[in-house]
Image: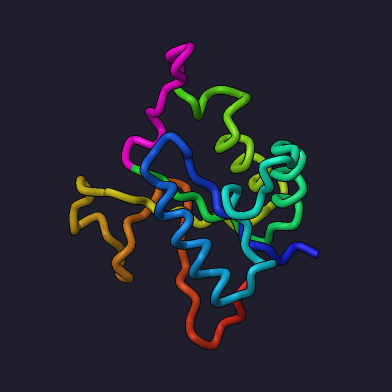
Amino acid sequence: MANKIFVNYRHSQGGGWAAEAIATRLKAELGVDRVFLDVLNIRPSAKFAEEIRAEIAQAAALIVVMGEDWHKIQDERTGNKRIAEDADWVREEIRTAIERNIRIFILRLGSRGASRRRLDSRGYTPVSGFSGHANSPGQRRC
């Protein structure tokens, strides 16, 4: 049954604190078994790839925590952008969510360059190709 929330973030960026705060709050609201964050849920002895794939298969939603210049982070060895590499777990998790039609919610951190005129009527900054909808108090949560 797909009823979990999977929190996706880039380890090499400052988004880890935000991802952990989001996961902790969601666990308090929805229950510890309904929210997945790798550093909180994967045991040190577990097989990382298998755990990630199993958890995203149970996801109803993916929250992508994007730090500033998230898309520019480079592989230390090759110098290539991480998001362009097939072996990038952030990319793999997002691609899997798209392929499985899992709802994706993007949280942008440190958007110091966002101008007020780019905010929509609800105060959100639109992300190209995505539309966001806030849940009303009476709407069912995933």
| Residue pictured at 57% horizontal, 48% vertical | 39
- Quarter assignment of residue 2: bottom right
| Residue pictured at 61% horizontal, 80% vertical | 140
Magenta span main SS: loop
43 up-or-down from 28: above or below: above
The answer to whether residue 71 is magenta is: yes
In the displayed structure image, the side of residue 78 where residue 3 appears, left or right: right
Q: Measuring from the top left, give residue 110's x and y in whole percent.
A: 28, 49
9 or 92, which is in the foreground? Answer: 9
- Quarter assignment of residue 40: bottom right
The answer to whether residue 142 is magenta is: no
In the displayed structure image, the side of residue 120 where residue 105 appears, left or right: right
In the displayed structure image, the side of residue 84 where residue 61 appears, left or right: right
Q: Measuring from the top left, give residue 45's x and y in whole percent.
A: 72, 40
30 up-or-down from 77: above or below: below
130 up-or-down from 80: above or below: below
Query: Magenta residues, as a range?
Result: 68-80
Q: How is the image coloured?
A: rainbow
Residue at the top extreme, as displayed = 78
Residue at the right extreme, as displayed = 1
